Image (cartoon, helix red, strand yellow):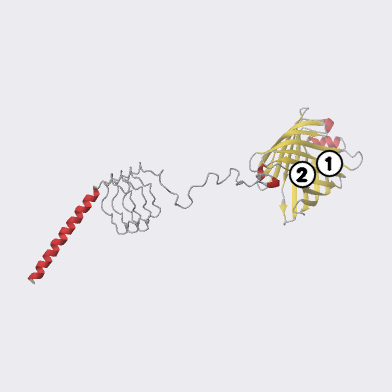
Amino acid sequence: MKTSKKNLSFIGLSSLVLLTSSFATAAEMSNMDHSGMDMSGDMSDMDHSGMDMSGNMSDMDHSGMDMSDDMSGMDHSGMDMSGDMSGMAHSGMDMSGDMSGMAHSGMDISGDMSDMDHSSMDHGSMDMSGMQGGQPPADARSPDYSNGVPYGQYGKPMMMGSMPLWGVSVDDLGYQFDEDQINFEATGWYGTDSNRLRLRTEGSAQTKDDKEIVSLSSLAYWKPLSIFWNGEAGVAYDTENDNAAVMAGIVGTAPYFIETDARAYLYTDGQLRLDLGAEYEWRLDQHWVVIPEVGLTAFSKDDHDNGITKGFNEMETEVRLTYETFSRQLAPYVGVSYETALGKARGQRRQENESVDSSSLTAGVKFWF
């Protein structure tokens, strides 16, 4: 029993000495100076798997530490850096060597590194050629994305919106049975989605007696004003009063998908004409469409020679039943039209023994290409 007590006392004393040595070693590490530390040799086979850096390293100075050589084989998989490294200075640390093979898979750097200084750390000389991707060559991509391949017989491609195109749209080419006349309305254009030149004409042609043709034609510059509205400005000619005019208008889609247009014409004699129109497409299925439309005409002053009175002169309405064929490019229709004089124009027409109101069955076709 006495021998056992002595052994226990010796073991306790030894443990106390080892514990004191450990604390002393940890205290010394906190003030370690790595400013002149040279790690330029080959450290490719160094194993840090059991390295414990959990102590206080807040005052460690790596400002002169040189790690410029090959460290590709260093293993930090078990390295513990969970201690306080807030005061570590890496301002002069050179890590330009090859570290492509270093393994940090188990490295714990969860400690406080908020005060670490990397202000002078040199990344410019770091060799990252071993990383995936690397630096692309100077001629990796040509500015026009052709990669040196010619465009062939069709030439360089263009964006759809910047390519000039043309089109023709005949909104009305029909016959009024009661009035015995042909009505027409057509538009042709050339340009892009941002700028176009438009030629538009509308009117009627009598099929009996003197076969008179009445039309209002315009040549205008067209440009989008917003998402739903486009503006027009140009010149026009009216065969009814044999007079030229300056034209300006706005065309677009009102709420509830109502196609709307408003055009003003200033004639050379000072007369001002205003045309207003609205149209809606009520689609029954993929082919059958009902289209009601209405139009109003107003003038700024009287012109008895041409049967014009100040204010709103007439209103025209029509309802069509159309059937769209050939990818909706051709649509024959049948319908009913109604015209009436408004305001003082009613009395003037009665004095001239002209009809005030009229209605007619219509049939025709609309198409575009």
- Left or right placement of residue 342 versus residue 36 in this view: right
Residue annotated with mark 1: 204
**Residue found at x 21% / y 53%:** 25
Q: Quadrant of residue 168?
A: top right
- Please identify the residue farthest to the top as the structure is shown: 269
Say what secondary structure mark 1 lies in.
strand
Q: Position of residue 147 (x, y in %)?
A: 60, 47
Report the front residue among 209 and 109. Answer: 109
Residue annotated with mark 2: 168
Mark 1: give few (<14), some (14-19) or many (20+) Cα within 10 Å: many
Q: Position of residue 339 (x, y in %)?
A: 80, 43
**Residue found at x 70% / y 43%:** 260
Report the front residue among 227 and 350. Answer: 227
- Please identify the residue farthest to the bottom as the structure is shown: 1
Give, as a three-letter code, the residue at label 2: Val
> Which callout, 2 or 1, points to the residue nearer the camera?
2
**Residue found at x 77% / y 34%:** 236
